[in-house]
Image (cartoon, rainbow, N blue to C red):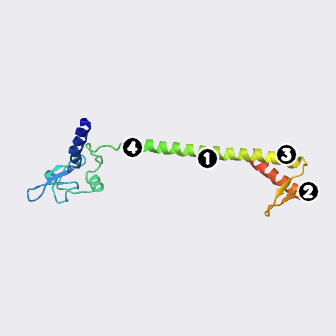
Amino acid sequence: MKFVHWLVLGCVVALPLSASAQWQWVDKNGKKVFSDQAPPPDVPEKNILRRVGPPPVPRANPNVDASPAEGANAEAGAPAKTAGTPKPTGVDKELEEKTKKAEAEEKAKRAAEEAKVAKAKADNCALARQGKATVDSGIRIAKVNAQGEREIMDDAARAAEQKRLQTVINSDCK
């Protein structure tokens, strides 16, 4: 039990370490500034001591502030990419795996839904065939009406029921 107390205490003590500042720079007054946000644009690159991402790629002439399109035209045929610029890796592996997993889940869901519909059609088919066999047998069939009274099916009702059951068989029994 004492081990658990020490473990909890260690976690509580280590918790503030994860909240350390990500940016550190020296402002124009010479003071060190710690922040979780990027420094203002007026702070020169040499005064930034710690940053979130990788350091920026140094330009050939820091006094020239040209856009990439202008820089490409100014150098007359020089390659547009800098040697220090990291090449994009393409598709993110995690994103690709998540996409494949989502597609597989969607496919499984569709297959389950199709199986459910096929089972319902098979059940309807079996019930329709059984009902048609009963109607075709010629035995007396009685139905209960809305008032709860039994009514014997006459020839016209029997023919209508045979026709209805045949349409169900034609649609569900394929």
Ranked by sequence position, the earlier of labels 4 and 2 is: 4
- What residue is at 15 percent from the left and 53 percent from the top? 25
**Front position among marks 1 and 3:** 3
Vertical placement of 130 versus 36: above or below?
above
For the residues labelled 4 and 2, say whether their Cβ atoms are less than 8 Å apart: no
Q: Amino acid at mark 3?
A: Ala
- Badge 1 element: helix
Q: Amino acid at mark 4?
A: Asp
Instruction: Tell whether 99 sits left or right of 137.
Output: left
Label 2 – label 1 distance at C-alpha: 40 Å
Residue beneath disc 3: 133
Label 2 – label 3 distance at C-alpha: 16 Å
For the residues labelled 2 and 3, say whether their Cβ atoms are less than 8 Å apart: no
Quarter assignment of residue 32: bottom left
Instruction: Tell whether 86 sits left or right of 146.
Output: left
Label 1 – label 4 distance at C-alpha: 31 Å
Q: Can residue 173 be seen at all in this image of the molecule?
A: no
Determine which of the numbered discs, if any, sits on residue 92 in the image. 4
Q: Position of residue 109 (x, y in %)?
A: 56, 45
**Front position among marks 3 and 4:** 3
Q: In the picture, which quadrant includes the N terminus?
A: top left
Ranked by sequence position, the earlier of labels 1 and 4 is: 4
- What residue is at 25 percent from the left and 43 percent from the top? 84
In the image, 5 versus 99, the foreground residue is 5
